[in-house]
Amino acid sequence: MNGGGIIAVVLLAIGLIAMFVAVERRDRRLKAAAPKAVSRSALVQSAYIVEDITTGAGGAICTVLLALTILLSLAIFVAAKTVFGEIEAGLLLIAGTLLFGMGIVLGRERSYRVYRMPRPAPPPVPEPPRDHSRLASLERLSKLER
């Protein structure tokens, strides 16, 4: 490899690592933002759904194969002696990215957890205001005497 090819491989590796770190940080932030377990008496909603998306075994294999395809196509491009070798490297990159990129997307596993919550109690009915005037107390006494 010449100097330009080595620089391209190093920059590609740095880009892949930066992308991996960004995705991991986003996943941690989303998991930290998920609500913690709450006592059943404090719940108001009827249900709460938590979605968890993880990369399955197929998605992980496709991620490794995508990285290898990118590195291989870059090496073929750098080592190409003719324009046809460069075209071959470009086609390999496009085909590998489409094939293994779809494998990564389809290799995700989604799982859902549903937390059922009790219905809230109806609000208490307020008592009618009591009349504390002297006339009202005399009327109540007269009703009691009858």
Image (spheres, rainbow, N blue to C red):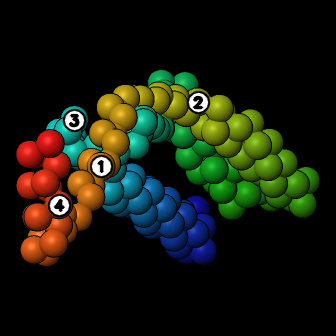
Q: Residue at x 20, y 39 (%)?
A: 41
Asked whether, in this view, residue 41 is left or right of residue 62, the answer is left
| Badge 4 or badge 3: first in the primary sequence | 3
Nearer the observer: mark 3 or 1; the answer is: 1
* In-front residue for pair 92/81: 92
* In-front residue for pair 9/19: 19
* In-front residue for pair 41/73: 41
Q: Quadrant of residue 79?
A: bottom right
Q: What numbered label is drawn on residue 102? A: none
Crowdedness of circle 2 by 10 Å Cα count: few (<14), some, many (20+)?
Answer: many
Indicate the position of residue 87 as horizontal and vertical percent values.
87, 54
Instruction: Quarter of the image for the C terminus: give it.
Output: top left
Indicate the position of residue 75 as horizontal and vertical percent values.
64, 53
Q: Which residue is mark 1?
A: 125
Q: Which residue is mark 4?
A: 139
Residue type at mark 3? Arg
Q: Which residue is mark 2?
A: 107
Residue type at mark 4? Glu
